[in-house]
Amino acid sequence: METPALTSLLPLVSRRFQSFAEAADSCLAMLGAVLPGAIVIGQIEHDERLLRVLDARGAEGLQIERGTTLQISGNSAVPAAGAATQLAAYRGDDLDPQLVSSLGAVERATLPIELSDSSVVGLVCALSQRRGAYQSDHLILLGLAARLLSYEWERVSAGAELRQLRQKLNEGSHIDPDTGLSDREGLVNKLSREWRLARRGTVESTVVACRVRVEAHESERNSALGMLALKDAAEVLSAVARWTDHVGRIGPGDLCVVMVGAEGMLGVEAMSNRFGEALQRVTAGRPYEISISFGAQALSEASTPEQALDLAERALGDFGVAGIGAPAGLADPEPA
């Protein structure tokens, strides 16, 4: 017989995740279907003793949303009078009890996103305005979500490190010094093999050009601020790309990903959505706001690898993501 708790696990077992953002969204869907109150997934910024909220579900009444920073305290913290009751066995970094009480929560359950080297990079928290809201079954589900997110965190980090190492080993001098990605010549070298396979009908691939534009500082695209935005975008694009894809820098403010095996716009749009969501998390609080425009070109439709790249660049602006990384107090730009 199916139970609500078992049914709620379906989002975690019914698919493979392409990014940490997808895994977090599925965990929130699972926990939100069973646990009362608000569910918060956050990344710990140890130096500042803050938890940066990566995503949240049902937390509007507590004024917690994506990008919010919450004060954390270590296991030596003494709860204030009337502070929320904590129901997890975990006694490491946790939300500051006085902060939790000020939000109106009277009960919380917290579990760590703990990596294999025992480092804690984030927290999964449940907050309720009703005492006695959480039971042992709820803690088990929180624990499953925390374990899944720990695995996905390490998988994404390891994949990014392996891609960078592979690029450095295989490309020799064809490395862009600012981003650590392939430069244009190095990317074209990789593109040549994929183009031949596509022309033979073996594997279709799609070239996707990405233009990074600093909205509030367009005149300073080559400034330190513009370079910071480009480096953030390059790091995130490398992380969300699949391990079979090729990523490079093809212009002053332009990046490119060769999506091997991607045919049509469905995969391209999924990648661009992952890119935009991940970049939003990474750049939250940065002193700039950026937009990303995309242009795509099927490899098999180009007469040369270079032409495929040129056509993708000409298509820049066909679709995009605007308003990424806007710090608090910065006016929203006009849509791109």
Image: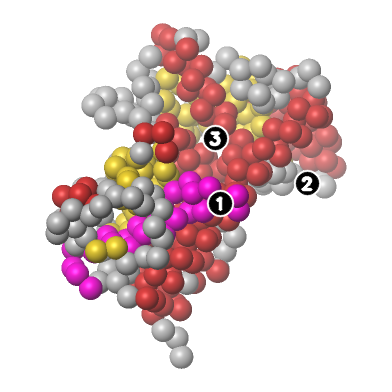
Magenta part of the chain: 107-132
Q: Residue at x 45, y 42 (%)?
A: 277
Q: CA distance from mark 3 to mark 2?
A: 26 Å
Question: Which numbered marker is on residue 118?
Answer: 1
Answer yes or no: do the residues labelled 1 and 3 have beta carbons within 8 Å? no
Q: CA distance from mark 2 to mark 1?
A: 41 Å
Q: Position of residue 47 (x, y in %)?
A: 41, 33
Residue 104 shown in magenta? no
Badge 1 element: loop
User: On screen, 331 above or below 144?
Assistant: above
Horizontally, residue 307 falls left or right of residue 213, namely right
Identify the mark nearer the N-term, 2 or 1: 1
Quarter occupied by residue 69: top left
Kind of residue at disc 2: Val
Q: Residue at x 36, y 52 (%)?
A: 75
Q: CA distance from mark 1 to mark 3?
A: 25 Å
- Look at mark 3 in the image and give the residue it sits on: 236
Q: Residue at x 79, y 37 (%)?
A: 194
